Structure formats: structure tokens, C-alpha cells
Amino acid sequence: MKNIINLSLLFAAAFLAGGLFAFFFSPSYETLPASADGNWGLSFPEEGEAPSGNATSDQLKEYNACYMDDTEKKVIYLTFDAGYENGNTPAILDALKKHNVPATFFVVGNYLTSCPDLVKRMAAEGHIVGNHTYHHPDMSEISTMEDFSRELQGVEDLYEETVGEPMTKYYRPPQGKYSEANLKMARELGYKTFFWSLAYVDWYEEDQPTKEEAFDKLLNRIHPGAIVLLHSTSRTNAEILDELLTKWEEMGYTFGSLDEIS
């Protein structure tokens, strides 16, 4: 019995020593909370104030990722997810050009093969074209670097073939689904991951929000340093963008490029 007790004490001491070693000598960065793995999510405080994400800006920064700019300046970073084309992007590009607003379009592989002229126009008019993966899968279910890299490299290759220059290494996970491992892989591939701090339900083609519903969300929840996610497939977005940009300008906002976020 004494030998068993002594052995148990020995294991307990070893476990405690290992825990102390890990505490003092583990890497300094924080890991993401368990609730952050899976789906990107936001909670909004008072009107006009920045929301809280299910991972903090400091936690995301360790993985070269962000969801807004940490600033008090009234600047907006406008982004569009482009999974396919249904005729609304030209009007969106027209409105951006009229207001001299830079944007980032996160595109999938199919968009590059089906709409090369629109992609060329985005680049020619000074917009960034980012990586939204080749097949638009649930990236949180991809566990190997080989499969993860293939999703991003396919879009990179098509973009360079289409535009004639390398793609900017900005990445947005489809549907905001991700894992800590994904963020590490993107960082290792030289990518910066961009989530968002303002979006609304605009992606159902047959159930588009009204103009009033869109303005209610996009005007009341705008905040300094916002990364806004809109879908270029949205008919409502195409119809209201000129007026929306005017209203944001009247509220004192200016527009920046994702390149300006450190």
C-alpha cells in the first residue's frame, strides 16, 4: 500500500511540475476562447458603438486577423463577398466610383472563371480583390495544411491569370466559419484574415430586405473603424449604395482601404 501511495505522490508531483513549466514557459500569445471556434459572431452595445466579437481584437491579432480597426476616427472599410454574379455588381462599382470609395471584393473560384471582366474592372478601379476560397466550403472542417492551401492557392492562380498580377493576400472564411488552426494556417501562408464588425441579412436572393430595413441596420450600427460586409449579389445593396454612401458621408464618415489597417 505504501508503494502505491508513494507512486501516486510521484505522479502528482510530476503533473504539478509540468503544469508550472507550461505556465512559465509556454508561448506568450493567448489562444482563442472555445466559443470563438466555429462561427464568427458579434454582440452590439449602444447605437453607434463598436460591437464585441466572440474573440477580441488582441486575440485575433496574434493570428494576423481582425474584425475592425481600433480607432476613434470615423472611417469605414467597405467589403463585399462575391460568391456568384447576378447582375448587381456593375451598379455597385458605379456607386463606388461616383463617391471615390475603395472596397475589397472577396471572390471565389467560380467568380473568377465566370466574370473575368468584372474582376479586371475591380482591379483597374483601385479595389482590392481578396480570397474567399475556391469552393466556398466550411473551412472549420478542413484540418490539413494541404487542403487548406489548395482552397486559397486555386483562387490566387486564377486571379493572376486573369489580372496579370499577384493577388493581395487577404482572406475571408466563407460564412465566417473558422477554427484556431485555420487562422494559424492562413498566417503561415502569408494571409491576413478579415472578419467584419457590421453586416446584415442581405444574401437571400428571393427574400431581399427593403430599403428601410437596410438603412435601419447599416446606419444605426455604423461605428468608427467598421469593417462592413455586404454581398454583391444583393439587389437592395445595388439600389441603395449611392444613397447609403451619401448618408454615411453626411454622418461625417470617410472611407479607407483594408491596406490601412495595421
Image: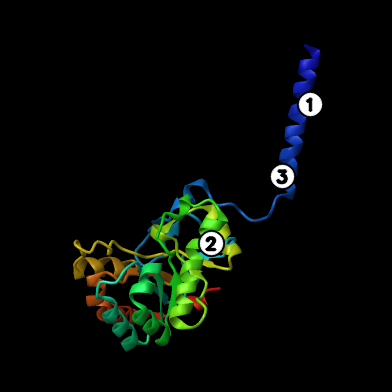
Note whether 206 is above or below 143 in the view shown: below
The quadrant holding residue 118 is bottom left
Q: Residues within 10 Å of mark 3 (few under 14, many from 20)?
A: few
Note whether 62 is above or below 22 in the view shown: below
In-front residue for pair 86/38 = 86
What quarter of the picture does the N terminus occupy? top right
Q: Position of residue 105 (x, y in %)?
A: 39, 74
Residue occupied by mark 2: 149
- Of marks 1 and 3, which one's residue comes earlier in the chain? 1
Q: Is residue 180 left or right of residue 21?
A: left
In-front residue for pair 28/223 = 28
Report if the CB atoms under discs 2 and 1 are less than 8 Å apart. no
Q: Position of residue 173 (x, y in %)?
A: 44, 61
Q: Residues within 10 Å of mark 1 (few under 14, many from 20)?
A: few
Name the element at disc 1.
helix
Q: Position of residue 29 (x, y in %)?
A: 64, 56
The quadrant holding residue 187 is bottom right
Residue occupied by mark 1: 10
Q: Residue at x 74, y 38 (%)?
A: 18
Looking at the rendered structure, the kind of residue marked 2 is Ser
Q: Is residue 224 left or right of residue 186?
A: left
Report if the CB atoms under discs 2 and 3 are less than 8 Å apart. no
Q: How far separated are the C-alphas under marks 2 and 3?
A: 31 Å
Name the element at disc 3.
helix
